[in-house]
Amino acid sequence: MTSMLTHTIRNLPASSAWAARVFARSLSCSPQLQAAAVQPKSKKTLAKSGVKNIVVVEGVRIPFLQSGTSYADLMPHDLARAALQGLLNRTSVPKDVVDYIVYGTVIQEVKTSNVAREAALGAGFSDKTPAHTVTMACISSNQAMTTGVGLIAAGQCDVVVAGGVELMSDVPIRHSRKMRKTMLTLNRAKTLGQKLAVISKIRPDYFAPELPAVAEFSTSETMGHSADRLAAAFAVSRVEQDEYALRSHTLAKKAQDGGLLLDVVPFKVPGRDTVTKDNGIRPSSMEQMGKLKPAFVKPYGTVTAANSSFLTDGASAMLIMSEEKALAMGYKPKAYLRDFVYVSQDPKDQLLLGPTYATPKVLEKAGLTMADIDVFEFHEAFAGQILANLKAMDSDWFAQNYMGRKSKVGAPPLEKFNTWGGSLSLGHPFGATGCLCRGRAGNDAVGSVTVPLEAPSALTTYESLWPIRRITRGCSVLLPVGYTGEGEVSAMFSGVCVLALKTFPDFGWRRVILPNLGKKDLYKKNGWEMGCAWLPSAVEAVDGSPGSALC
């Protein structure tokens, strides 16, 4: 993929419309993001012949709280139980009518690995009601919902409760592998002498714990780092990210104060007061947000605590039925669940562009266009991720070269997009977010598309395009022709050195001289040695490929 993108960029005209739109366009002045593309609105019904209509009767959640606050002393099944009880209280659905319960979670508590079952029993459901737990990163509760849809569509169930839960206040912290092996060996020792022999082998480093990391196992890279690289690849500036984050918090605050967050149910926390609202909504100012330092790629990254979703505790629950069953029980459905799509890409270079790939697929599957949608709900893991997706969706070049499509799907108009805030402001309890997105969309409009897909997909970022030798004193490299003025360059190397550009308004190449990188400029991040330097104005246009370098 790297070579494909490199070849494509190399042969792209300098006046490329994609370069102008995707890399140089700002959120504030983009007409594409301010108004929907002119497309005819379809009138067709989405009902499918021979397929049951499946409906959402109700969706609730307990307030989403910043980790380490009121839920800190609880366990995940406590939160999930509270959400289930809130759903029962809201709907008055008899417990014995529920055929199945499915929950999603990401960081599992070892004691309650099937948290759905434990929460169901705690909420008073019959021990004859089956329940299981799924995990699929930040779309775990989406998987729970679509599992329920599948059970109903297949005729196995008529009533399913789906939901999700996450408790980031108390994540499992393990002993080191050496200590675990020693403890297991000690457990098998029979005599006192054997036990003392095992204990005598313990060394101080055995006591170093294994702390959990929100990172891809296959790449060892955190999502925050991926978001920073994605923002750089799509030239999403720090200012744009802060502006979008401020928008999310402002809209969420307005919705909260206006009583629009109807999915929230109060939760009496044992030993504490009753929690009635989310506590992470914090409208600030651009000035205050601008003071924060980068959170992941330091010191020159653009992703900060202010434009990222925060660690969150929370749980959600949704009552799903066949339409026939819902009407027979006297319920008025809030929404129909018609179609869904899951996508997956390279976990290293294509992690966070899921909405770009999924949106056109699910629209085509349903026979709809962007103009048919009244409400868009996209999961906001990071502001940079959202803005990169909007730019990718609005790019014909990206659609043609990466998605195999003839034309772009188009970016959702902002007046229809996450109008009550999103994960940046409301919070992101990993396993519960999907139900939040679906529930808000159902409350906000009849026609909606929910794409909380943060997982597998992203543009091959430009760190991977310039493999050069280790940067030492004054290295000559090729940069885009349109790159002028001073700008930031990050160099990362571990055996092979790769160069990541911060901005590049156009394509084509110039040679520049990198300043010296001394030891004081280097630091380690996720096992990579990294260095940052500032470039002088680009000089001396040359011919050559992006792989050229003279060190």
Image: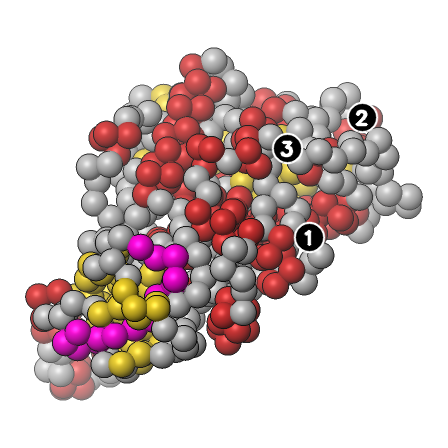
- x and y percentages locating residue 264 in the rendered image: 49, 25
Residue at 33% across, 61% down: 501
Say what secondary structure mark 3 lies in: loop
What's the residue at 91%, 45% (across, down)? 50
Classify 10 Å Cα crowding around label 3: few (below 14), some (14-19), many (20 and above): some
In the image, what residue occupies the spot 80% across and 26% down? 327
Q: Between residues 498 and 158, which one lies in front from this camera angle? A: 498
Dot placed on the residue nearer the N-terminal end, 3 or 2:
3
Q: Position of residue 25 (x, y in %)?
A: 46, 43
Q: Is residue 222 left or right of residue 454?
A: left
Q: Which mark is residue 407?
A: 1
User: Mark 3 touching mark 2, by CB under 8 A?
Assistant: no
Of the two numbered discs 3 and 1 on the same chain, state the one appearing first in sequence: 3
Residue in the foreground of this view, choosing between 324 and 247: 247
**Figure coloring:** secondary structure
| Magenta-highlighted residues | 471-484
**Is residue 146 at all visible to an observer of this figure?**
no
x, y percentage for residue 544?
Answer: 41, 77
| Residue tagged 2 | 327
Vertical relation: 411 (above or below) 198 = above
Can you tell which quarter of the image residue 90 is in? Answer: top right
Which residue in the structure is indicated by mark 3? 36
Amino acid at dot 1: Ser
Give the image location of residue 263, x and y in percent: 53, 25
